[in-house]
Image (tube, rainbow, N blue to C red):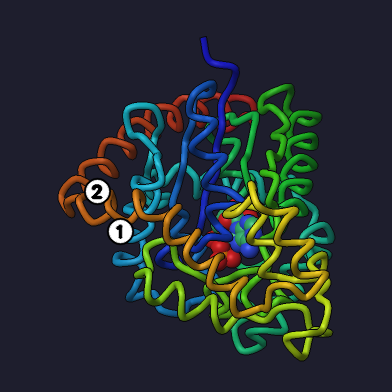
């Protein structure tokens, strides 16, 4: 007997990075044991920024390869593409009728997007959190594994659900966020969250050489200018990644850094080696997955997701009084 239902989605931005893995994917994998899990590549969300749309297919494929190699199992989870189950667009429209515009205009990510693309402040952009709510509640998910950056969206999803349930009667569970112990992985610049669009990331599928090259270029403690300066691991980006990849030696590295017994170059080399070691099985598995297999997984996922979506929409239409 499973404990409940899990849903999460990610935009098809291409190959996944270690921020995605540490912040979200590792939970996707773990939750498969005890929950009914549904994981979705949200291609319609990607259209809100209308860049690189010709890459959507290739990016979707790359992302699914990463998810499968990281341990998502189509026998245990439903893995599918958002636009393959068009009921989500219908639910988005219906939920938009109970969502006050003021709630959406206040969302920080919307304000950021307006600044980033003033030439393209489209209707879909402001409705992004409503579509995300539709994604989650179409499958009546209880738990949503995400990184910290998604928490405001999830809070809004809960508000929309509460409003819908108040007006039309108890229909959807209020979804709860599930964070990993690494909910906000900093990028190699040490300033912003790790993100592909900021090019401060390490792809899970990168070669060992590329991984090492990127780590060697990472920013560390800004106060440590010379090899003999004592370091401050608590503010160092590289040290924060050691938490995950070198946890057994973490205290030792911290002490050595504070006492200037190891330099940043040595510390980074150790991190690069450990990341490469940790990712070797993933990289090997990914290289063995066939193109055709991914297509089969997605077709089967869409079929299974569709069956649930149809049921929910039947109930929603009835509750909303649609003739
Ligand atoms: P990106 O920011 O690279 O475009 P997405 O927005 O598609 O990635 O995020 C996919 C999932 O990975 C989300 O659950 C998100 O919260 C999580 N995530 C993304 N970047 C990070 C990060 N740097 N640290 C922790 N979690 C992250």
* Label 1 CB sits under 8 Å from any ligand 1 atom: no
The C terminus is located in which quarter?
A: top right
At 76% from the left edge and 40% from the top edge, which residue is drawn?
Answer: 158
- Do residues under tags 2 and 1 come within 8 Å of each other at their CB atoms? yes
Circle 2 residue: 294
Circle 1 residue: 61
- Is residue 9 at all visible to an observer of this figure? yes
* Nearer-N-terminus badge (2/1): 1
Q: Is mark 2 on a helix, strand or loop?
A: helix
State the image coordinates of residue 80 (x, y, percent, origin top left): 37, 44
Q: Does residue 269 lie above or below 161 as drawn?
A: below
At 39% from the left edge and 40% from the top edge, which residue is drawn?
Answer: 71
At 18% from the left edge and 54% from the top edge, which residue is drawn?
Answer: 291
State the image coordinates of residue 64 (x, y, percent, origin top left): 35, 52
Q: Residues within 10 Å of mark 1 (few under 14, many from 20)?
A: many
Q: How crowded is mark 2: few (under 14 residues within 10 Å), some or many (20 or more)?
A: some
The reply, left or right, for residue 153 in relation to residue 274 is right
């Amino acid at each position: 007997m499973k404990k409940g239902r899990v849903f999460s989605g990610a935009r098809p931005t291409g190959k996944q990075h270690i921020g995605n893995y540490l912040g979200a994917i590792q939970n996707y994998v773990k939750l498969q044991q005890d929950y009914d899990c549904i994981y979705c590549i949200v291609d319609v969300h990607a259209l809100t920024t209308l860049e690189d749309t010709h890459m959507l297919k290739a990016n979707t494929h790359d992302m699914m390869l990463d998810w499968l190699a990281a341990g998502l199992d189509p026998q245990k989870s439903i893995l599918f593409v958002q636009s393959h189950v068009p009921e989500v667009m219908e639910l988005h429209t219906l939920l938009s009728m109970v969502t006050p515009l003021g709630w959406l205009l206040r969302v920080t990510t919307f304000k950021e997007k307006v600044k980033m693309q003033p030439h393209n402040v489209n209707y879909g952009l402001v409705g992004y959190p409503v579509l995300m709510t539709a994604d989650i509640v179409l499958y009546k998910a209880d738990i949503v594994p995400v990184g910290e950056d998604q928490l405001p969206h999830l809070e809004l999803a809960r508000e929309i659900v509460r409003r819908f349930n108040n007006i039309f009667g108890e229909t959807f569970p209020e979804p709860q966020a599930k964070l990993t112990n690494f909910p906000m992985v900093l990028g190699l610049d040490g300033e912003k969250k790790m993100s592909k669009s900021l090019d401060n990331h390490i792809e899970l599928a990168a070669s060992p050489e590329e991984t090492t090259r990127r780590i060697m270029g990472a920013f560390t403690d800004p106060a440590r200018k010379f090899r003999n300066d004592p370091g401050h691991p608590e503010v160092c980006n590289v040290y924060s990644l050691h938490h995950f990849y070198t946890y057994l030696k973490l205290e030792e590295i911290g002490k050595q850094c504070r006492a200037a017994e190891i330099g940043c170059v040595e510390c980074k080399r150790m991190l690069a080696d450990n990341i490469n070691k940790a990712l070797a099985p993933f990289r090997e598995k990914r290289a063995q997955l066939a193109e055709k297999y991914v297509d089969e997984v997605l077709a089967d996922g869409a079929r299974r997701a569709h069956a649930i979506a149809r049921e929910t929409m039947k109930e929603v239409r009835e509750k909303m009084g649609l003739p």
